Amino acid sequence: MRFILLTAGLLLAISVHAAPLQRAEFGDDAVEAQVVVDKTLKGQFQQVRQTVVDRTSDLVVTTMGFLGVPYRRGGNTVETGFDCSGFVRAMYNQTVGHLLPRRAEEQAAATQKIDRSELKPGDLVFFNTMRRAFSHVGIYVGEGKFIHSPKPGAQVRVEDMSGSYWQRRFSGARRVVDAQDDAAKTSGD
């Protein structure tokens, strides 16, 4: 997705700077054609941006609908309950149509590493809760908070990452890259 956005931005920037040259060399018809290209690129950029916003919003809104579902080790449905990775996997599959691996450490390996300062709603946050990195996972919802299925006897809930327990155990942030992003990376990046 980043590749598409960067490409659209680059093409838009090139077209804006190329317009005076085209007028001098090719006349008013070229300028009119350039305006059409500019509007098309701008429209495509806005459409891609809106799709990303919609998907992220849908994901976060959907996860909130599962608040209160009980934790269950190995659980991956609302009927059985969720463990942490089962919850994340179900939310991404149901909302975005992206099937993540089953275990938290596999989810970390299958997603793109990002810096904590780059977190956006929908990104994954990982914690060391069992004396190993990436033993727990949740979905970042914004404003320093994440939603997860925490432990036996608890329910899906929102937590503040700035709490001392979570700060001490934070082991990384990851971004789920969809199939379109993967294709863009392999074809031209």
Image (cartoon, rainbow, N blue to C red):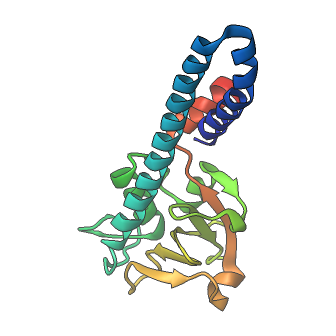
Q: Position of residue 8 (x, y in %)?
A: 61, 34
In the displayed structure, 77 sits above or below 1; it is below
Q: Which residue is drawn at 57% across and 29% down?
A: 38
Q: Residue at x 51, y 83 (%)?
A: 159
Toward the bottom, the furthest residue is 164
Q: Which is nearer the eye, 121 or 5?
A: 5
Q: Residue at x 42, y 52 (%)?
A: 55
Q: Position of residue 42 (x, y in %)?
A: 54, 37
Q: Quadrant of residue 127?
A: bottom right
Q: Which residue is drawn at 36% across and 73% down?
A: 64
Toward the left, the furthest residue is 79
Mark count: 0
> Is residue 140 among the parts visible in the rendering?
yes
In the displayed structure, 138 sits above or below 55; it is below
> Is residue 132 among the parts visible in the rendering?
no
Image quarter hosting the C terminus: top right
Q: Which is nearer the eye, 132 or 107?
A: 107
Q: Position of residue 162 (x, y in %)?
A: 64, 85
Q: Which is nearer the eye, 55 or 15?
A: 15
Q: In which quarter of the image is residue 34?
A: top right
